[in-house]
Image: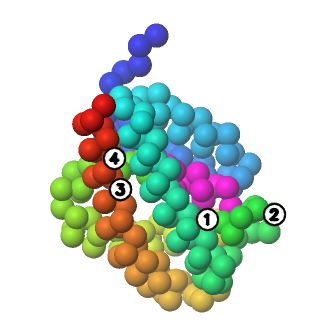
Amino acid sequence: MKLPRYSVLYNVVLFQLLWFIAVLGANQYLFGVALLLSLHLIWCTNRRAELFLLLSAAAAGIVCDSIMAMAGVYVFASGTQTLPIPGWLIGLWLGFAATLRHSMAPLMKKPVLFTVLSIVAAPLSYLAAAKLGAVEFPLGQLTTAVVVGLYWAVLMPLLIALTRYSERLNQQS
């Protein structure tokens, strides 16, 4: 069976499904998150470059969110985590990393715009997760949104650099 070509639309739909499964299902549906990430890797033409990006970009986000959780900016439901952040958020970071070379590729050409958009969009995503009961913000929504926006101002240029490096890996293969 031949899979259809991996399009931007498939990547957007895959990430949105992954986001909702992770946020609404917490750790109960990690299998679904893993299944969607596997489908993403099956569709990708250069798995070496894609795996590099998924692991490196997700690691950067996981470290940032772990620091935020340890600092008390985020609080997750008890029993949902073994690390400073729960497994579903790790899956979410892997899913977000899976968009960088695909549906987010046009924004890679405009790094300043992409960074500014992430400063606004990332806090909105965290606030949506809070509204769905996945996370709480002891410092309040506004303070948390500002802190999240500030760390994305630093994180996004790193994610852009990692994506560009993965593109060079892709061209070498």
**Disc 2 versus disc 3: nearer the observer:** 3
Which numbered marker is on residue 166?
4
The residues bearing labels 1 and 2 have C-alpha atoms spaced at a distance of 17 Å
Q: Position of residue 34 (x, y in %)?
A: 61, 40
The residues bearing labels 4 and 2 have C-alpha atoms spaced at a distance of 35 Å
Which element carries disc 2, helix, strand or loop?
loop
Q: Which residue is mark 2?
A: 79
- Magenta stretch, residue numbers: 86-96
Q: How many marks?
A: 4
Instruction: Check disc 1 and give the amino acid type.
Output: Leu
Which element carries disc 4, helix, strand or loop?
helix
Q: Which residue is mark 3?
A: 162
Q: Position of residue 53 (x, y in %)?
A: 42, 48
Instruction: Check disc 3 and give the amino acid type.
Output: Leu
Q: Position of residue 1 (x, y in %)?
A: 46, 10
Contact (CB < 8 A) between labels 1 and 3?
A: no
Q: Which residue is mark 1?
A: 132
